[in-house]
Image (cartoon, rainbow, N blue to C red):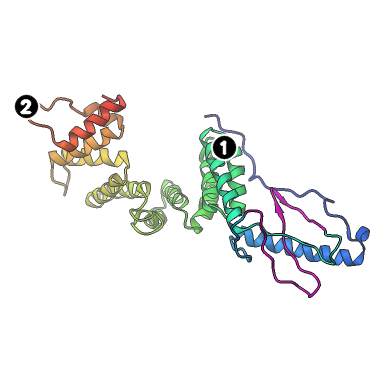
Amino acid sequence: VQTPSRCQAPGHSTKPGSTPSAARRGPDRGRALSATRQAMGAAVAHIAATVVAATAVAASDQVEALPASSTTAFVHTIMKQPRFTVRVADNVSGIEVGVLSAARIEDIAALEFHEAESAWDSANLLGAIRMFMRSAQKGYQVGEYCFRWGLYHELPPSDVVQAKRWYGRGARLRHQGCTTMLGKLHLAKGEGLKATELLLKTAAPRNYGGESGDSLAQWFLAEMNFQSGELRKAVRWWKRSAENGDVDAMYRLAEVFTDGALGIPQEAARGKHWLFAAAAHGHQMALSRVSLSNGTSARPKVEQRWLDRMEAMGWV
């Protein structure tokens, strides 16, 4: 995939002169417009932080009234995509503004997020990031927006400083991918202690990485322990990663148990188990080592299921 040219993070700009001036509307209208601008600014801040003052309403075309600032005027907020607009009512002394319900805003943000994922899968990276930004501005999956910018900056020609900056932002939001990738960057720079601290947050079960932990972080920790000669710790992390579906960890376990190592006894049956598991998930080296013939002995049921899957996928 050809990488688009580098650019700064896209942002929205406002069109000058879109709101009538106070001079043309008179002092009363001018004060009302000033109050409206303050109300709109507060509404934007609330939406960006996913804190909505108004109670969500079921129907998408309903609005929720906010407390009146006086006995004669009240303020709502009307939001129209992609920017806020003002509606002036001639028959009232104040300005009516409406607030879209929280449910409606979240639905719009979710739709934009799914469109962004489709654009990313189609290699329209910058277009996807702009859509991720729009959903993030509504408080939806902000960490994922940081994660995509980090991935983008890791593509050739890479900008590790910017990648680290975006991953760091997402890690502060406890985003799993950002935390793991930030740990990976620290590992690549030889900062083992910082890398371990970050990777443990997502690798450990019931933490940043969810109930069973992040398989990629578990893989990195296993490789770190392997390189430092702590093979038993490496096997434990490889096993957790393999159980979470990491195919490279499956193949590592197949090698370790087939050949044995210091502190790890040779166990041909376990080695064969993980070899078939890796092959059944499409690992090329594992596929090249799988024997389709089992001699005269019956093949274990689990091996037969994996072999059937390999045949169904056309791998053997």
Amino acid under label 2?
Thr
Name the front one of labels 2 and 1: 2
The spot of residue 70 in percent (x, y) is 78, 74
Q: Badge 1: how crowded within 10 Å, few (<14), some, or many (20+)? A: many
- State the residue position of label 1: 125
Q: Which mark is residue 179?
A: none
Tell me which numbered mark, 2 or 1, is placed earlier along the sequence. 1
| Residue 4 visible in the displayed image | yes
> Is residue 63 inside the magenta stretch?
yes
Q: Is residue 272 visible?
A: no
Quadrant assignment, res 275: top left
Q: Position of residue 216 (x, y in %)?
A: 37, 46
The disc placed on residue 296 is 2
Residue 4 sits above or below residue 267 on the image:
above
Given residues 88 and 282, the one toward you in this image is: 88
The residue at 23%/34% (across/down) is 306
Task: Establish if 27 lies above or below 102.
Answer: below
Nearest the viewer among 87 and 201 is: 87
Q: Quadrant of the C terminus?
A: top left
Read off the magenta span.
60-88
The x, y position of residue 269, in whole percent, is: 13, 39
| Alpha carbon distance from label 2 to label 1 | 54 Å
Q: Secondary structure at mark 1?
A: helix
